[in-house]
Image: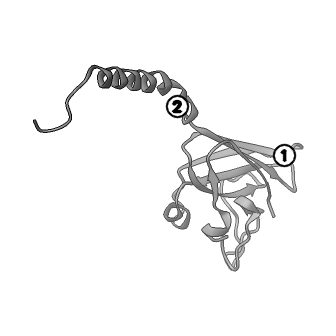
């Protein structure tokens, strides 16, 4: 005989284990169905829009290839952007306040932004955007951040 002998109690155990997996599958799927990232932006002016880019990798962040993006109206209350149904993982955000509503970040003659901008975790850059390490955050449940556009 090559292996253990199959006994009725082994069959009952296998059936019980399979039933437990099948019955718990909907709960497990619901638990991992997706998470929300809610971002509230403190703006200095109630005009224009806040442009928000969400990155799911350092490569995407460095090359400006967002996994998702949103545009929200600026107003008296904090502008709020919400990304839903995100899988667990590491993310970062880049945002700017398009004060004049022209759809792009305005720069001066030296290439320095003239409109407010910010990064997740309120990370700051040195002569450029904040590094991935400063802006990244973990998502394993719903996440909320308040970000100051400056």
**56 horizontally vs 14: left or right:** right
Label 1 or label 2, whichever comes before in sequence order:
2
Residue drawn at 66 percent across, 75 percent down: 128
Number of residues whose C-alpha sits closer than 10 Å to that of mark 1, classed few (under 14), some (14–19) or many (20 or more): some
The residue at the far right in this view is 76
Residue drawn at 67 percent across, 63 percent down: 135
Does dot 2 land on a helix, a strand or a loop? helix
Residue drawn at 68 percent across, 52 percent down: 51
Question: Closest to the observer: 70 or 37?
Answer: 37
Does dot 1 land on a helix, a strand or a loop? loop
Q: Which image quarter is the C terminus in?
A: bottom right
Query: What is the x, y in percent for residue 15?
Result: 35, 21
The answer to which quarter of the image holds residue 5 is top left
Number of residues whose C-alpha sits closer than 10 Å to that of mark 2, classed few (under 14), some (14–19) or many (20 or more): few
Reading the image, the residue beneath label 2 is 28
Question: Closest to the observer: 4 or 93?
Answer: 4
Question: Closest to the observer: 139 or 75?
Answer: 139
| CA separation in Å, label 1 and label 2 | 35 Å
Reading the image, the residue beneath label 1 is 78
Query: What is the x, y in percent for residue 69?
Result: 60, 48
Q: Is residue 111 above or below residue 59?
A: below
Mark on residue 21? Answer: none
The residue at the far left in this view is 1
**131 horizontally vs 100: left or right:** left
């Amino acid at each position: 005989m090559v292996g253990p002998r199959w006994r009725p109690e082994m069959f009952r155990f296998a059936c019980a284990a399979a039933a437990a997996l099948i019955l718990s599958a909907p709960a497990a799927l619901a638990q991992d169905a997706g998470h929300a990232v809610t971002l509230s932006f403190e703006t200095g002016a109630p005009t224009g829009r806040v442009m928000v880019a969400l990155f799911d990798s350092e490569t995407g962040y460095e090359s400006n290839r967002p996994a998702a993006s949103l545009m929200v109206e600026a107003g008296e209350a904090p502008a709020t952007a919400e990304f839903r149904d995100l899988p667990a993982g590491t993310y970062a955000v880049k945002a700017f306040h398009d004060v004049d509503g022209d759809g792009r970040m305005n720069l001066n003659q030296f290439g320095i932004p003239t409109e407010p901008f910010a990064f997740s975790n309120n990370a700051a850059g040195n002569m450029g955007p904040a590094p991935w390490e400063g802006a990244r955050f973990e998502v394993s449940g719903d996440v909320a951040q308040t970000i100051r556009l400056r």
